[in-house]
Amino acid sequence: MITDVHAHCFPPRYGVMAAELGLSVRQYAPAEGSHGRPAAYAAPPEDISKRISAMDEAGVERQILSHIVAPYLEDRKKAIAAASLLNDELKAFCANYPDRLSFWAALPLPHVDAAIEEMKRVLDDPGAVGVTLQCFCLGKSIAVPEFDSLYAELDRRAAVVLLHPCQNAIGSAFIGDWGLTACLGASVEDSVAAAHLIIREIPTRFPRIRFIVPHFGGILPMLLQRLDGQLPFQLTEKPSITARRFFYDTVGWGSRAALAAAHMAFGAERLVPGSDWPVLLQHESYATTFDHIRESDLLSDADKRLILHHNVQQLLDKHTAPEGRQPPDQGGAGRAPGT
């Protein structure tokens, strides 16, 4: 059976709080008649049984849930309140089907001390699998030095971290103003966030953390050799090696090219199932999302088993610390910022 690491849930109570606090993402424009709230916020409580039925039809044993809108606020008290409510709502939602649903804990960033306290409060719950971090936090990279103590605690816990784009158009009008925030900008966010983690050597300095980069790593699979050859920083290992320390989910909208590139760049053992539920339902059925892997003529049967069943079990096992695959010998030079 499949564990879907990239699925979403929209608790209405958190949606109301998020709207009141002005939290939103650019891809969710306020819907007409929703009193200024994005459509995702205005949704009523969902029929969980329909989610479970879709999982049964798709052969998915478990979904690990997160919210698209992170509780990132400059006001410390408001960020803590938002993160606490979201985590409690996700916990309650998953408690309806504890054998089928788990969740990624949200953190009240940029307040690192509060984020560590929220981890202590939430991660001991059996429904919490790890934490989710957006690729950027209020205009800052998640790899900036001020977050190092957060990574130290995540490393101590051997935590799993799911990255997710915040739909900030990577700060570029050439993406946002042209309607490309979700369809192109999200993949660029994934790639840049992963590159920032590589440059600051977060995966090598905190090797017990398991990172999942979404959407097959965005454009990263095509850039490993270029990063090795042109990144102007002196790192302890080549960027392509560090990139193979990450896991990557299979959210790709059915793209054979994306699957092929990620498979060639990272190897089947670094790919884990993801769906982006319910976002992809506008494009295809839930079962079809995983049929792209099951029916792929690009993969061997052994690789399909790794991607759909084996890797996620290894990923969630805190007692296992797999190393990245070694790429061909290629070089880089310079010194990374903030190290």
Image (tube, rainbow, N blue to C red):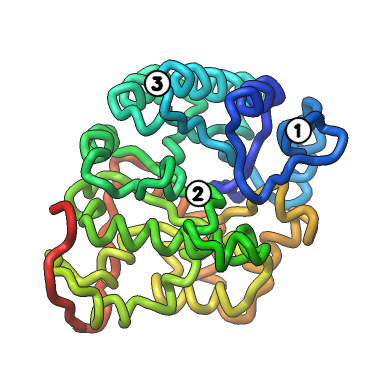
Which label sits in the foreground, 3 or 2? 3
Q: Vertically, is 124 above or below 232? A: above
The alpha-carbon separation of the residues under discs 3 and 2 comes to 22 Å
Q: Vertically, is 318 above or below 220? A: above
Task: In this rendered view, identify the residue nearer to me: 95 or 14.
Answer: 14
- Identified at 26% across, 59% down, the residue is 323
Q: Which residue is mark 3?
A: 76
Kind of element beneath mark 1? loop
Q: Vertically, is 7 above or below 176? A: above
Instruction: Provide residue 180's location: percent of width, then percent of height.
Output: 63, 64
Residue 164, numbered circle: 2
Lower position in the chain sequence, tag 3 or tag 1: 1
Q: Quadrant of residue 149?
A: top left
Q: Amino acid at mark 1?
A: Gly
Which label sits in the foreground, 2 or 1? 1
Residue 36, numbered circle: 1
Kind of element beneath mark 3? helix
The alpha-carbon separation of the residues under discs 3 and 1 comes to 25 Å
Q: Amino acid at mark 3?
A: Arg
